[in-house]
Amino acid sequence: MDTKNYDFLIYKRGTETKEAKSIELKIPNGMTCTEFKIMCIRMAHAIGYHENSVRETFGKIDDKKSNKKQLKLLFD
């Protein structure tokens, strides 16, 4: 894997659960702050935070460039 062009955002759960133990997002270098915000929102949803809590914390997602079908899959 070529890691020179990517950074990683990794979450590892420290307790025993039936949910995801580890989530790793490969982030391209040069990502804008808005794109990083969307990545953090995706991570929060993947970890299991409720949609309302995520929305209260991060605010509205500016999804002009994002794929609405992909976001819908993440929220369902």
Image (spheres, rainbow, N blue to C red):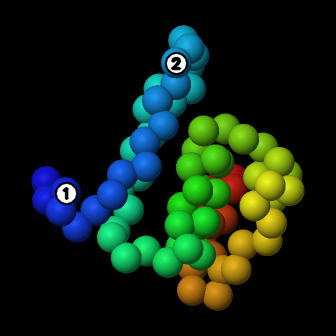
The answer to whether residue 48 is seen in the rendering is yes
Q: State the residue lying farthest toward the left.
A: 1
| Secondary structure of the residue carrying numbered label 1 | loop
Residue at position x 66%, y 65% in the image: 72
Identity of the residue drawn at 33% across and 58% down: 7
Q: Which residue is more in the foreground, 63 or 35?
A: 35
Q: Which mark is residue 69?
A: none
- Residue 14 marker: 2
Kindly identify the amino acid type of the residue bearing the numbered disc 1.
Thr
Q: Is residue 67 visible?
A: no
Q: What residue does disc 1 label? A: 3
Neighbours of disc 2 within 10 Å: few (<14), some (14-19), many (20+):
few
Q: What x and y, as percent, mark residue 40?
A: 58, 56
Using the image, determine if residue 1 lies above or below residue 49.
below
Task: State the residue at coordinates (83%, 48%).
Answer: 53
Q: In the picture shown, does residue 11 fall above or below 51?
A: above
Q: Quadrant of residue 64?
A: bottom right
- Label 1 crowding class (10 Å Cα cut-off): few <14, some 14-19, many 20+? few
